[in-house]
Image (tube, rainbow, N blue to C red):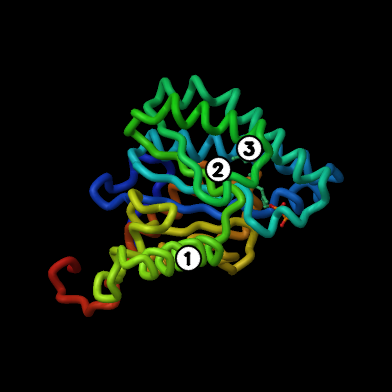
Amino acid sequence: MSSKRIPRDGDDLDPGRLPRHVAMIMDGNGRWAKKRLLNRIQGHEKGADTVRAMVEACREIGIPFLTLYAFSTENWQRPKREVDALMALLIKFLENERDELQKNGIRLAAIGEVERLPGKVRRALDEVMAATAANDKLRLILALSYGGRAEIVRMARFLAEAAATGKVQAEEIDHDWVGRHLYTSDVPDPDILIRTSGEMRVSNFLLWQIAYAEFHFTPTLWPDFGKEEFYRILGDYQQRERRFGKVDTGADTA
Ligand code: FPP
């Protein structure tokens, strides 16, 4: 980190060097609750406030894509009570935020095995996604029943079928082809991946897409994460040199 001043709000950031796509692993709701002798569900409820704050921050500073890991394929194995509460929280979030998303030009999208979600959640999701489909200031992408390996398996099955029926030839398969057959086909790869709660793992999130993402891990638990720390992380991101496997030609550095 250089001696540049640390951003305290979005205005201190260089608008020309903002990430286009921020991906977040929202971790630590359970530990946040435990520390306060609350139940895990109360931790998730507080976590939903951080979701709102991050959506607002991205919109305010002009980041066009935000992907949040809201529910993994592995999360189905949590106790039914917790899964039900997370689904209920999602419905509440969609109902409460619908107008706000619309007013602010935010488009809602979802990636993952959404067909596994309860009908009530799917209907609420479909409704808000359809209502906001034409918005283009920020795309809020919720990863729901999402797993990176499952996404790659899904693409491989599609490829096997297409090859077996002669719809695709081996020579046509390249990085672009694979990218076009993932859930994120019309989304740029994440520039930065942030994970809260001190865990330094990727946990099956956007495995293909994060090939060149900058990683940032913070010990802060998700419900305690806020705009100020987010801006600090973005300030750090702006000072990193991204080479994408190439050598520095000196053109971009003093
Ligand atoms: C991980 O914390 C968090 C989740 C599995 C769920 C994320 C959900 C939210 C932030 C709330 C609602 C989301 C939306 C989009 C409205 P954890 O439970 O694994 O925490 P722990 O590791 O401390 O136990």
Q: Residue at x 39, y 57 (%)?
A: 190
Marks 1 and 3, how far apart at CA: 35 Å
Asked which quadrant contains residue 159, the reply is bottom left
Residue 194 pos. (x, y %): 50, 57
For ligand 1, tell me if the residue under mark 3 lies within 8 Å.
yes
- Could you tell which of marks 1 and 3 lies nearer the N-terminus? 3
- Which kind of residue does numbered mark 2 sit on? Gly
Residue 65 pos. (x, y %): 38, 45
- Taking depth in this image into account, of 144 and 240 the one nearest to the observer is 144
Residue 119 pos. (x, y %): 66, 34
Q: Is residue 248 above or below residue 123?
A: below
Q: Residue at x 47, y 32 (%)?
A: 129
Judge depth for marks 2 and 1 and give the one in front. Answer: 1
- Contact? badges 2 and 1 (CB < 8 Å): no
Q: Residue at x 40, y 52 (%)?
A: 184
- Could you tell which of marks 2 and 1 lies nearer the N-terminus? 1
Return the mark for residue 226. Answer: 2
In this picture, residue 27 sits left or right of residue 142: right
- Could you tell which of marks 3 and 2 lies nearer the N-terminus? 3
Asked which quadrant contains residue 51, the reply is top right
To which residue does mark 3 refer?
48
Mark 1 lies on a secondary structure that is helix
In this picture, residue 172 sits left or right of residue 162: left
To which residue does mark 1 refer?
157
Mark 2 lies on a secondary structure that is loop
Mark 2: few/some/many CA within 10 Å (<14, 14-19, 20+): some
- Contact? badges 3 and 2 (CB < 8 Å): no
- Taking depth in this image into account, of 235 and 89 the one nearest to the observer is 89
Mark 3 lies on a secondary structure that is helix
